[in-house]
Amino acid sequence: MDEQLLQTIVIGLSNGLIYALVALGYTLVYGIIELINFAHGDVFMLGSMLALTLLVYFGVTTGTDPLTAISLIVLVLAITMAVTATLNVSIERVAYRPLRHAPRLAPLISAIGMSFVLQNVGLLWKGPANIGFPDVIPNTNILTTVLGFDTNVAITYKHLFAAVVTIPLLIVLTWFVAKTKQGKAMRATAQDPDTAGLMGIDVNRTIAITFIIAGALAGAAGLVQVLYNNTTVWNLGFRFGLNAFTSAVLGGIGNLQGAVLGGIVLGLINAFSDRYLSTQWTNAIVFGVLIAILVFRPTGLLGQQLADRA
Amino acid sequence: MKLSKVGALAAAAVFVFTACTSPGATTAPSDGGTGSRPDACEGKTGTSSSEIHVYSALPRQGSNKAQTDALVESIRDALEGQKVGDFTIKYTDLDDSSAAAGGDWDGAQAQANATTAANDPDAMIFIGHFNSGAAKLTIPILNAACLVMISPANTYPGLTKEVAGVTEPGEPASYYPEGFRNYTRVIATDDAQGGAGAAWAKELGATKAYVLDDTQVYGKGLARAWALAAADLGIEVVSAGGTSEGFDAKATDYAALAQKIKDSGADFIYIGSITGQNTGKLWKDLRAAMPDISIMSGDGVFEAAWYEGAGDAGNGTYLTFGGVGPNEQTSDAGKKWVADYRAAHNGEDPPVYGIYGAAAAQVALDALNRAEVKNDRYSVLQAVFATKDFASYLGTMSIDENGDNTLSEATGYRVVDSWPPAFEKVLVAPE
Amino acid sequence: MSSLIAPVEHGKTGGLPAWLAHLAASAANWPAAYRARVQASPRRTVLMSVLVVLVFAYPLLNRAVLQPFSRNVFPLPAPDDTTVVFMLIFATMAIGLNIVIGFAGLLDLGYVAFYALGAYTAAYLASPHWSGLSILLFSDLPAGFPGIHLPFFIIFWAAALVAAIFGALLGAPTLRLRGDYLAIVTLGFGEIVPVFFKNLVNVHFSFGPIQLVNANLTGGPLGINPIDPPQLFGIEFGVIHGFNAVYLGLAVVIMSIVIARNLERSRMGRAWMAIREDETAAEMMGVNTVRTKLLAFGLGASFAGFAGAMQASYQGATTSDFFMFATSILVVIMIILGGIGNIWGVILGAITVQYVDKTLLSWVGNRLKDTGVAIGSPQLGEINPSQFSFLLLGLALVLMMRFRPEGLLPSRQRAAELHAAPPDQALGSAAVMEIEEEVIEEAEPEDIDVTPEASDAGGGGAPPDPPGRTGGTS
């Protein structure tokens, strides 16, 4: 196969996995309370800002000894996840829970408002320009340097990193939702919160736990984003949010595997449009595809799974 | 069908009010240019016997705030409370950006600023705008109000002159409905900077160039001017259509774009953009794919915030500046201004546009001092256009009949592992 | 008959003279109707009259009193003409979006697309952009002047028509989608339309007889500039004549109010509310949901077309930078804040939000600066409240949803729904029962649409109806 084409696929796949990571948070929340949590992208953005700040604070930079770097990154990961999980569950408590029985528009609008608040917090915190972060994970081509292939296609440590983080996470999440007791409670709440309540499931607690998981996921994604893209900015949540949300919808919102599939498809569409057309048309193409898919398959590629009350 | 009586009342009121306030509103352009006082300037004289008002309209929030803070500070220091003749200058800092526009310039806000100044009989000079797009909207308003503008930062050529391939048909005449000029600037235009940059790239050995822009007025204008000049100099422009190609500032990454550029075989990249358009990420992705390629960009990214965003990926970048950068000021006045700024700001270098604000204020003050009638707009306007061989912070300059300045120098810098970049040379645009 | 489409159809089919005649007839009948109205509810009518007079007098008052006072004595936070015009432009959009969200319950997050379409339509029809053509109509430009130059009263309706067509086009494929998906699709559409306007600048395209080489379709990032100012009877309403433009804007808003109120009370309006409440039930009751939703989208979008035409011709320029996601959200914020579902509420929302964003915050910032200088701590001036405007608006949205979801000036029906607890928690609360009864009460006389009392109920807590809606019946 053509090397240029292969390279585009590699870029698309790896970017897609990063989108998927954010998309999982949207899909989890939507799956359980049927709310497009507009603020999720911005929690992710704040997570990436916090992670970047902590990494700089701990002095992680290019050439930091790998073992030290990894242990510090794990520490930063833990802190970031704890903070964003707390933030996310507080948002749920303040902005969504009181509106549980209001018309559907109400929490959605509350979410949009929250998203603006968080964006502006990011703007006030770090200012309007991109903040850079050095390459901790090297951009070295594994194919040529480690495996000794003679090729122009580059699969770097960063690409590998995207796969190594996202795929296990998806497996763990799927297992959690499908096999654990808490996962069962989530599925029950998603299907019918009233009946679930009658069956002895603490609905509020279940929803709160979902938000905690989604928030932790946003924090993890924020850190991954900093290491992968080496930058963050106040409107990152909007940039990623649109792509991630579209991924979730493409795959069938509420469906974990769907979010990952959607992310990958979207990553590929983005990469192909950027490579063979022009970046300035990419957004139009992404939304064109989204509209087309929703028209022909209103429940996305894999259909809705967690939430099944149309 | 039932119709509201209020509707009828409104319709009637509209005609009554407008009829009595605006008899024969369309004015034919006056012949202008011959020195005869244009109709629009009739009666445009201040009412206060002690004050003259100077306004500036700049984006005071969002990504340009650091630049405009320095601009406003320079203008305020130069003008506030100064005496010209019997008058004291009162300076007002207006904001042409809004939250609705994401902190960037907002057309409605810019026009509101212009009308505010136009309606103030004591307003004699309007310093602005930062963005050429905003100036496009307000020049006609201030033209009708006979109020002279001095821009410290607009580089789009079409505001003052016609440049083939860069400006639109009808420009610049379309901005001056009253038939006379009222817009001046103390900064060089894109075509000068783009041309100088292309000539430098040629010297640096560029043969195949890929030209990118941020799809904004400034970025696209500069990139197109560079591409045109480069093509004339024999550099092959391989981006789409042989001109500049837009990049989407909202994209999450540019890895595939970088791949596309790599595959095109280009040995040189030119980027027309302002910092806030995701430039940090763009540089990083370009560098990751092409560690050794030469990248050049213009003064839109000539600021510390850009380097912070791009990090190491910014190293090696050639930067051009449409004028003489603050640290290379050759005039004594310029050097002193920079030294004063550093002294007042704990040794920090001034943001690039700061000195242009100071120069604009200087030109304004000089013109007010020379104006025959200091509180007459037309008199002040003529004085600004009559600026000749004036020793400004930017060097000795004159304002020509288009409103452009005669300083056509551009300067070239290279980023060497830290900010600020190292000065390389004074650039000359090819003829 | 409570006819809904009449005002719109008149415009589109060129029955403008008939409409004007009707306006004139209504105007002739005005004193009697007004007296009757004063007798029916004196306080409201007087209040409303004072408000109307104040609104109309504002530009004069501003010029004669407020501006000189601001310059010479103490700066007042008084909006200038351009800000007032934009308040009115946004009020028009709020009225239109209220039809889509407030009446029909379809969440549209890409309303800015229709604003852009309206603006570009107006720009195409009244500018030198198509410099290869020369089409002049009722124009005092010299023959052969490049570009298309149609009069404002044509481009105004053309802009609305184009926006409406696109509204229906967008609506068609999304009809099967549920609320949230619809929000995303409309959001996407709102992102796509400006992308097209921004990028269609060096177009190379060939398809059969259509050959485009380096065609400039939209002006790219420069946009289209200059655009002819609106002109009626030789009077200009462009930015240079901001004073006149305020009255044109008022006329547009009043016309929008008339159309929207007629729509609200029509059969279609009730159908919209029915699908908003329960789409399945509405369909069972014989509401044609497809047609109803398409009309909501199309008619709602046409108001953004009006607004776009106003923006382009007033400012004399339009570029894709004016049409961002933030603008869509801003209009949503306006209608939420003002009182979704209530025309007067959303107008209040539009005016408030514009006022805060454009005038009040920067005024506060300048006063902080002055105070800082006066008390010798210029750091105070570093605080720029304008920067916080979206933070404040976001907070306002969250707080409103939590504590007053019906908005500042609620629609009574909406308020009842929003405050009615769900069945499992209601416990037959007397208050809720009362409100629900009111809702029912209100719904019935509406159908007949004769008595002024009925219309009062419809207006809810809002200012009373314009006098004499039904002429002699009171």
Image (cartoon, grey):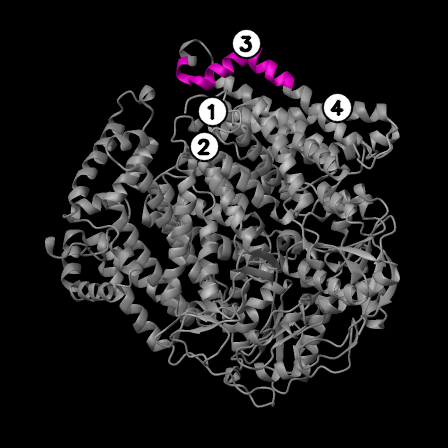
Find disc 3 in the rendering and name its residue. Answer: A181
Q: Is residue C80 visible?
A: no
In this view, the residue in front, B127 or A175, is A175
Find disc 2 in the rendering and name its residue. Answer: A107
**Secondary element type, mark 2:** helix
Q: Amino acid at mark 2?
A: Pro
Q: Main secondary structure of the magenta part?
A: helix
Provide the residue span drawn in magenta.
A171-195
Find disc 1 in the rendering and name its residue. Answer: A33
Marks 2/4 in contact by CB < 8 Å: the verdict is no
> In the image, B291: left or right of B278?
right
Q: Chain of mark 4?
A: A
Marks 3/2 in contact by CB < 8 Å: the verdict is no
User: Residues at marks 3 and 2, common chain?
Assistant: yes
Label 4 and label 3: CA atoms lie apart by: 29 Å
Marks 1/2 in contact by CB < 8 Å: the verdict is yes
